[in-house]
Image (spheres, rainbow, N blue to C red):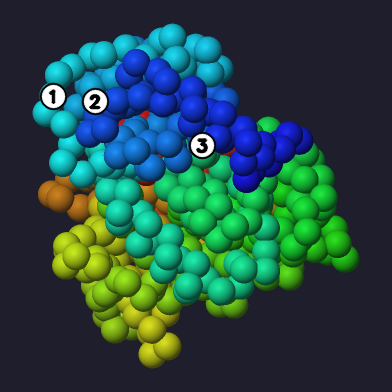
Amino acid sequence: MIYLNDQHFDKNYFEQCYQQFKQHNVLGSCQGKRITACISDAALWIALCLYARDHGISVFPLPAGTPEEALRRRAKLSASHYQVMADSMEELLAKIEQISDHENDIEPVLVQMSSGTTGEPKCIDRTWVSIDIELHNYIEHFTDLAQMTAVVACPVNHSYGLICGILASIKRGSEPVIITNFNPKYIINKVRETASPILYSSPALITTITMMVKADQPIHAIMTSGTLMQATWLAQAANKCEKLYQQYGCSEVGCIALGGDIKSIHDQGVPLPHLTVTSGSSSEALEEIIVTTENNTLISTRDLGFLDGNNRLHFISRIDEMINVSGLNVYPAEVEKVVMEMPSISDAVVFKKSHAFGNDQVCLQFVADQEIADDKIRSWCSQYLNKYQVPIQITQVENIERLPNGKVSRKALALA
């Protein structure tokens, strides 16, 4: 069924887990209930996830290492009936704790958290039925996947790794390789050991891995998602793999678009067939990306983008992250691309800070292997950007803080 690091877990393991769950006084009769679960054993979590899906149970997975108080807070936020934190089957069965007597869920769901990059994270309910529809269309749309084995080096509690990496593989009869040891050398070794691997990971980790891979020994395939890659990172990844894919989605819908032969950091491929996607008509006529699901639910993504003549979706910026300078729009990725092309700079993030009279200031954090004066960066940017796009506040840092999913919280940077 799955590989977890160096260990194989076959169908018999999952059948034994199911049997123990069925005999438990809570899990055996838990249909319609909601459980918040923080389980450090990834194989055990996958077993519980599949059991919940198959037995009408709602589940809210939290990342391993979540503090107990954070578990309680999120369990309450999600209106869960039970919560559990466990490192093993014995702990799981012994520590399930009832915390509420809310009404049962009419439809069982997988609870996901929004990224929280532009506001307070919130709980998103996705029915198991909608996830199954996503999986069917993901597999039908992404036909290349049939010839590859997913190597999942990203969180197993989040939609990207859990649904697209693990559940999609299991549904099509493949055995995904799940990696919880995020040491780049270890990941490279596991990729080398896997036949026709496709590495699912975050842009930041993909960048580190492809820095270490030799150009004459490329990775078979790489999938990136979660946030825009820096242009230099994307070029590096493309040179270190045979096939590069990018996908775009949101917590409410899951995967929205996916494609290969990526031409730019903004290119997200073609929308999945069960979704209707509308947006702008060109890079000069951007509009919010709006998604209509299979049951006619309208989702406003709060992302700006456009669909080109080949129906490929291009994501430009979060609406909340766009910078308004005296009525002129500045898109962070455009400025970051220019900054990253400056010699010695290895990472950069552009964000806004509110200024007087409703105007925003363009702010920059960057990482470099030597000290670079602010004026040199402004001079460099002035050669390639309009005056209003040039960063005003500039800070050199040792590293740029990223969330576990690889995204940068520009809101947090603005408040720092």
Quadrant (top left, top right, bottom left, bottom right) of the C terminus: top left
Q: Quadrant of residue 279?
A: bottom left
Percent x, y of residue 129:
30, 54
Secondary element under disc 1, as helix, strand or loop, is: loop
Q: Is residue 281 visible?
A: yes
Q: Residue at x 41, y 10 (%)?
A: 95
Disc 3 target residue: 46
Q: Is residue 343 visible?
A: no
Label 3: how many Cα within 10 Å (few below 14, some 14–19, many 20+): some
Extreme residue in the bottom direction: 309
Q: CA distance from mark 3 to mark 1?
A: 26 Å
Q: Residue at x 82, y 50 (%)?
A: 193
| Rendered position, 311 above or below 414 | below
Extreme residue in the right direction: 216
Label 2: how many Cα within 10 Å (few below 14, some 14–19, many 20+): many
For the residues labelled 2 and 1, say whether their Cβ atoms are less than 8 Å apart.
Answer: yes
User: What kind of residue is marked 3?
Assistant: Ile
Q: Mark 3 or mark 1, which has the lower sequence index?
A: 3
Secondary element under disc 3, as helix, strand or loop, is: helix
For the residues labelled 3 and 1, say whether their Cβ atoms are less than 8 Å apart.
Answer: no
User: What kind of residue is marked 2?
Assistant: Ser
Q: Quadrant of residue 58?
A: top left
Percent x, y of residue 394:
46, 44
Disc 2 target residue: 80
Secondary element under disc 2, as helix, strand or loop, is: loop
Marker disc for residue 102: 1
Percent x, y of residue 272:
39, 72
Percent x, y of residue 136:
42, 65
